[in-house]
Amino acid sequence: MRITALSGGVGGARFLRGLLDALAERRAAGAGGDAASPADEVVVIGNTADDVTLHGLRVCPDLDSVMYTLGGGADDERGWGRAGETFAVARELAAHGDPPDWFSLGDRDLATHVLRSRLLAEGAPLSAVTRRLCERWRPGVELLPMTDDRVETHVVVDAAGLPEDGSVRSPLAEGLARPGERALHFQEWWVRHHAAPAARRIAVAGARAARPGPGVLEALAGADVVLLPPSNPVVSLGAVLAVPGLREALRATTAPVVGVSPVVGGAPVRGMADACLRAVGVPTTAAAVAGLYADVLDGWLVHPSDAPADGSQGQDDPLVRAEPLLMTTPADAARIAAAALDVAETARDLDLRSRSRVGAPAAHAGLAA
Amino acid sequence: MRITALSGGVGGARFLRGLLDALAERRAAGAGGDAASPADEVVVIGNTADDVTLHGLRVCPDLDSVMYTLGGGADDERGWGRAGETFAVARELAAHGDPPDWFSLGDRDLATHVLRSRLLAEGAPLSAVTRRLCERWRPGVELLPMTDDRVETHVVVDAAGLPEDGSVRSPLAEGLARPGERALHFQEWWVRHHAAPAARRIAVAGARAARPGPGVLEALAGADVVLLPPSNPVVSLGAVLAVPGLREALRATTAPVVGVSPVVGGAPVRGMADACLRAVGVPTTAAAVAGLYADVLDGWLVHPSDAPADGSQGQDDPLVRAEPLLMTTPADAARIAAAALDVAETARDLDLRSRSRVGAPAAHAGLAA
């Protein structure tokens, strides 16, 4: 089975690890059908709009989270970065007073960025660099950056009271802020300010001019199943879908498209997605997040407490399945991924792809590109 | 007193630490004369021809040895790099199979190179970058790169049997090797091959087009004393003197120029300078090394066993003083530096600068630029 998944960082990566586990369990169980084929191929289209240049090094947090998590190198307990990490380089850079000091670059992690930055400087596109890094990590999936072009999400906030020092400068920020506003690189807003300054607008800067990375459109067109993990629906999956052609490919694919809600009971399962949803004027509910994908979605997994009342679903709504979505252990993630695959099979059996999506709302309308 | 010293790496750095100690002792003792002035200023013109780009990062081993040693951050026991060093990044790069694997970049050390590389990439000249790094290290001297231009010493050897893998590529190596030869970056020859492949030629590649760094010529012209530490006379001080204008400035200064022999009893005090001397056709003797500086030298410190027989000195030869030159402890270095300052005072009293150097040999003739 050819499965193509979009992904953000840690949440997506853990779901993907569950997916690989679920596929392995299916193969081991010898369950019939093509899902049990040993030739399962998983392609991951990773968000690169969180990427940031720190200390002159190009950091791709989401791609790295996928590589590290699937390659067995992630620190599951801390929730980000490498297992067994040390911070000697970061301490030295701090001793030099070299900003920013709010983004922890571990030594092991830094090696990834050093190698990536050199290859990029030599002219290799990010997709080729990612392939090279995956030679070491062997994540068990084909990891494709959504684009080889530079895209960096910025959050526009009220400038008052924000420190100037230690700010990340991006050429893509040009023109995003009006007088009295500041356009913060997403990482600065998220990591440094903990998403506290209210987001007036979120812009996936550079997206309009970006082209899909090599293999991305083909992976969507040629998939048997397309999955949307419980990643941040605005700055992760929303950013992926902001690359021109991506959303169209997701609409056009013949594969069922199944998503997993990142919201449980009115709160994000992980992270601070509510702050992002507020910025684009979308309530933090499973149903509202499904609305962001309304034009592409065939199936939608929600937590039991978020399951719609019987009969509340319209004929053109995606198939909604209730499944406990708290992803505490790898086994939880495998169970959720297996449920998503089940929904995809049902959607295929019901031929949900053939229904009209003409009336679907202008999804992600609040997210500027 | 304004003292200007040329310097290579660790040997030069330890001598310079001794020099600062000797000056402090003089001031503490309240010895008369301008040597005791609290306004001692030491300018160090550092060799940059050992510099190398590794993993995309610009490494300046000699400048860093001076900074770390004088700034209290050097690992005296190991003899290079930072004290308390760890190697997490290097291990990761090795796990990625990213060459070279023969140059140990410690984590703390790496922070220096990350910061330097970023500033250089942003367009700052090496002299400004070095000033920035010295803000942290406060080495107690003004550390000037010999040039802001890229200069990289290469050693031309027989190509037979040399590994291609893990070789450092430099654009400056172009055209240095004839058929059957290889031009190795100095670091590759020195660190990877331990100077074992016989050097056919040593070329300070890029030197001919290099301009002296900001302040370099002024520091030589305005000095009260110029010192040549016991650094490698070919690839360290020879490389500094290969920058057009440097040697002329050393000839033209009114300050006495005093050197310390890096050779004791026919062997280098430190490192493998004999392999470099062979390459330029110079015997490994204190007298032969003095000959490399014949056109600029007023005083020369040698180990007692290397002192010339009475009456063997010509009238135009530099003043030679015997002093135990094994630099085992910081106190040794301070004693040697104090002796060098004494010789400089004697040379000034004797007005040795005024003597003709017309007959001086074409020094460093074997070193190609």
Image (cartoon, coloured by chain):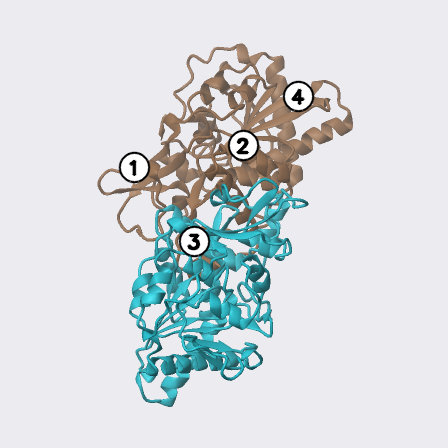
Chain colours: A cyan, B brown
Chain name for mark 2: B
- Residue A288, position in %: x, y? 52, 68
Q: CA distance from mark 4 to mark 2?
A: 25 Å
Callout 2 and callout 3 share a chain: no
Q: Residue furthest left?
A: B179
Q: Quadrant of residue B353?
A: top right
Judged from the image, the secondary structure of the residue bearing numbered disc 1 is loop
Chain ID at mark 1: B
The residue tagged 2 is: B128
Name the front one of labels 4 and 2.
2
At mark 2, the secondary structure is: helix
Query: In the picture, which quadrant includes the C terminus of chain B?
Result: top left
The answer for which chain carries disc 3 is: A
Residues under numbered marks 1 and 2 in contact, where contact means CB atoms less than 8 Å apart: no
What residue lies at 72% left-to-right and 27% top-to-bottom?
B26
Q: Is residue A58 left or right of residue B38?
A: left
Disc 3: which residue: A115
User: Could you tell me how far apart the alpha carbons at marks 2 and 3 are, in whole angstroms?
Assistant: 26 Å
Which amino acid, by three-letter code, is at mark 1? Answer: Glu
Mark 3 residue crowding within 10 angstroms, few (<14) / some (14–19) / many (20+): many
Asked if labels 2 and 4 touch by Cβ distance under 8 angstroms, the answer is: no
Q: Are marks 3 and 4 in contact (CB under 8 Å)?
A: no
Q: Which mark is residue B1?
A: 4
Q: Choose between A55 and B202: the one closer to the eye.
A: A55
Q: What's the amino acid at mark 3?
A: Leu
Residue at point 31%, 81% (across, down): A38
